[in-house]
Image (cartoon, grey):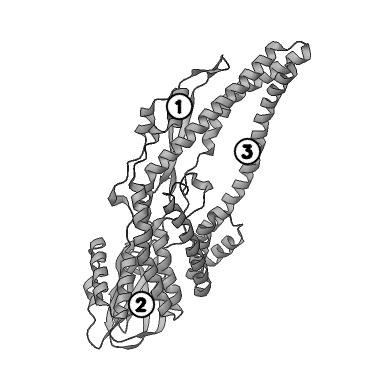
Amino acid sequence: MRKSRLLIAALGVMLFASCASNSKKEGSSKSSQKEENHKYLAALDEGRYDDALKILSKQKKQKKNLIRDNYDLAMLYHLTGDYAASRDLMNQTERLMDASVTKSISQGFAAAVFNENSVEYEANPYEYIYLNIFNFFNYYNAGEEDEAGVEIRRMNDKQKTYLAKYGEFLLTDDNYNADSEVQNAYTSLNINPAEINGSAPAKPTSADIFKDSPAARYMSLLLYMREGDFGNAELDAKMLHSMNESFDTKSELNISRGKGRLDVISFTDLIGRREEERIVIGPIPTFPFVINKIIVTIPDFDIEFVYPKFVHTDNSRITAVKMIVNGQEKTLSLLEDFNYAVQKDVKSKAKKAYGRSVRRSLAKKLSAVISAATAVVSAQVAAEQADNPVAIAITKAAAIAAIYALPPAIEAVDKTETADIRQVYALPGKAYASGLELEPGLYDVTVQYLSGSRVIAEKNYSKIRVRENKPTILESLL
């Protein structure tokens, strides 16, 4: 019996040492991944898309992040003009997204959003829609107009299948306080629930849910105009106007008989990135904790909860985009700021992310308290029952080590709690669009990017064919 207790005490010390060693190895691996990700994002921010493509292509893909990484790669191929590679990867990514989100819908999203960064990334709702917009251009820029039209129809279908169901789930209440495990943790750890509830983000409203995109409606409008379906084109124009009242939808609908129209849609900048919001509750005062009828004094400690946040500052140098055709100039209108979609997405998910973090943090904290207190009690009992000088010295050392290890063991669990701030990085930040009515024929087009009155970049496009009675679409990327 005494040997058994000595073994328990020794194992307690070994356990803390083993955890520290594993933590160092895991930290080294994460540090390497973080460094590679930093290089990738730096290349992306500097507009070095070829370098970003090389860096991301070489990174080892994790199954849980496959959708995100494939999506980023597909966007980088698109940005560098390899439309075939982008198309193939976007089609593959969309199949993965379909399977993932369909499964999540059937399970009420419970499995898809429970373990944050450890679960498969299924993409954010706005990313479902934007994928089809850019895959449209993969086909359209390659002259495959029928296939391009399929992408817009897929995009419209997603509003009926994915976005509506996702919105319903996000609006359901998440009463984490009703969980028996949470209630048990409150009681066992001497926690006041009011402190937890007071730091929770606001519950989302219907206005916070991403339902549609001005760029999506614009692309759908143009598709229907090309097909001569003016009824659906007018419906898209009305929805676009409701989202962006300053955008000129009337001109898009009215093409004079015998004329054609050239519409330019320009994508600029990069979409903003979400961050982690970390809430610290405490300190929870020192309190007695009973293990096998022995009282262990638990030192004061904090509890940390996390959820995503989005704080975006517009640092773009581009203040206007202009198209020039045959001496005619037209300033493009701001069609959509994609950062607004990220803002809505983050706000709609924050409350549920906080609730999941509360559940995990309290469970891990209670487990750490029980494990640490048990190690202290085992070491103390072994020390009291030792019957020779060597055993006494070993068990006393183990008891002291267990006591000193107790506070850091309880606090260490906070470092394991991280918010899911994953997203697709290579999406643009803004879309500008407008058009000119022209005679049918071939045209050279210049798209200028301005900062104030100064042209900071210029793209030239040759022999763009404008057809009679329908819009021609030109994508310009910077």
Disc 3 versus disc 1: distance between alpha carbons?
29 Å
Disc 1 or 2, which lies upstream in sequence? 1
Q: Position of residue 235 (x, y in %)?
A: 24, 69
Secondary structure type for disc 2: strand
179 or 287, which is in the foreground?
179
In the drawing, what numbered circle is on residue 473? 2
Q: Position of residue 416 (x, y in %)?
A: 54, 38
Residue 433 placement, left or right of 91: left
Q: Looking at numbered disc 3 in the image, what kind of residue is underneath it?
A: Ser
The residue sitting at 61% across, 25% down in the picture is 405
* Relative height, residue 413 to residue 398 (above, below): below
The residue sitting at 46% across, 27% down in the picture is 185
Q: Is residue 213 visible?
A: yes
Q: Looking at numbered disc 2 in the image, what kind of residue is underneath it?
A: Ile
Disc 1 versus disc 2: distance between alpha carbons?
61 Å
**Badge 1: few (under 14), some or many (20 or more) residues near its Cα, within 10 Å?**
some
In the drawing, what numbered circle is on residue 332? none
Q: Position of residue 366 (x, y in %)?
A: 51, 28
Q: Which of labels 1 and 2 is toward the front?
A: 1
**Badge 2: few (under 14), some or many (20 or more) residues near its Cα, within 10 Å?**
many
60 or 329, which is in the foreground?
60
Q: Which residue is mark 1?
A: 184
The residue sitting at 54% across, 34% down in the picture is 413
Q: Quadrant of the C terminus?
A: bottom left
Q: Which residue is mark 3?
A: 23
